[in-house]
């Protein structure tokens, strides 16, 4: 969060019209550095959007057990930073909220907070078996709120794509990912001189 505020400070200094998005989770929202960044961003009216990716479990602790308030997007009120809760499982809602936040920053109004309520289907890392929630809960979220499935439904209902169109897109994406994984695992390492490619010393 402080790094994001710093990048936004550089943009404000250069007056280049850019806006920085800085992302952190619901667990990190309880750290002191967040509020230091909020304070500086508000003080200097920095063009930064603080995006709280609220998966409701941080690394493995339910939000209700670790956070004193459900409405994390309101944490900026003490600094005069407006915030908004967004359905992170709805692609169009996230796009709309992002555009609104960018317009706010570009108008010179300072920072904005988006709490994007989302859900992860797996553990926080490979070593996390995610036993702090039931399989039924995960399956219900996947069945009723999966963002990719929602978009597919909308496209088909609006007759903007057919099932076959979407299957072709899915196959194309799987092929790209498979090629990238194969390249990462099997191609030889680059020469050490590549460490400095596109780096200005």
Image (cartoon, rainbow, N blue to C red):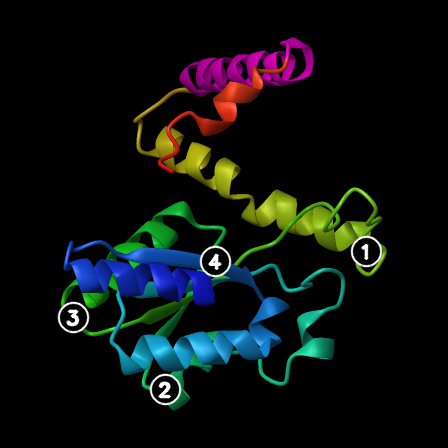
| Residue 179 location, quadrant | top right
For label 1, the SS is loop
Residue 82 drawn at (x, y percent):
32, 78
Residue located at (74% from left, 78% from top): 65
The nearer-to-camera label among 3 and 1 is 3
User: In this figure, which residue is indicated by the disc labeled 2?
Assistant: 79
Residue 183: in magenta span: yes
Residue located at (63% from left, 43% from top): 143
For label 3, the SS is loop
Segment colored magenta? 163-188
Mark number for residue 108? 3
Which residue is at the far front?
Answer: 201
User: In this figure, which residue is indicated by the disc labeled 1?
Assistant: 134
Residue 129 drawn at (x, y percent):
84, 48
The span from disc 3 to disc 4 (Cα, nearest Å) is 21 Å
Q: Residues within 10 Å of mark 3 (few under 14, many from 20)?
A: few
The span from disc 4 to disc 1 (Cα, nearest Å) is 27 Å
Q: Residues within 10 Å of mark 2 (few under 14, many from 20)?
A: some
The span from disc 3 to disc 1 (Cα, nearest Å) is 45 Å
User: In this figure, which residue is indicated by the disc labeled 4?
Assistant: 23
Q: Residues within 10 Å of mark 4 (few under 14, many from 20)?
A: some
Residue located at (57% from left, 15% from top): 190
């Amino acid at each position: 969060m402080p790094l994001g505020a710093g990048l936004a400070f550089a943009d404000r200094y250069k007056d280049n019209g850019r806006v920085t998005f800085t992302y952190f989770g619901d667990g990190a929202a309880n750290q002191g550095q967040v509020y230091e960044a909020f304070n500086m961003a508000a003080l200097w009216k920095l063009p930064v959007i603080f995006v709280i990716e609220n998966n409701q479990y941080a690394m493995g602790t339910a939000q209700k057990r670790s956070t004193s308030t459900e409405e994390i997007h309101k944490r900026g009120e003490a600094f005069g930073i407006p915030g908004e809760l967004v359905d992170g499982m709805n692609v169009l809602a996230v796009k709309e909220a992002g555009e609104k936040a960018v317009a706010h920053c570009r108008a010179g109004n300072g920072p904005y907070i988006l709490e994007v309520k989302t859900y992860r289907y797996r553990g926080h890392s490979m070593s996390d078996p995610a036993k702090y929630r039931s399989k039924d809960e995960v399956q219900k979220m996947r069945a009723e709120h999966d963002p990719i499935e929602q978009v597919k439904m909308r496209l088909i209902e609006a007759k903007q794509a057919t099932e076959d169109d979407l299957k072709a897109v899915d196959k194309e994406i799987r092929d790209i990912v498979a090629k990238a994984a194969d390249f990462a695992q099997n191609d030889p390492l680059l020469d050490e001189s590549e460490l400095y490619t596109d780096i200005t010393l």
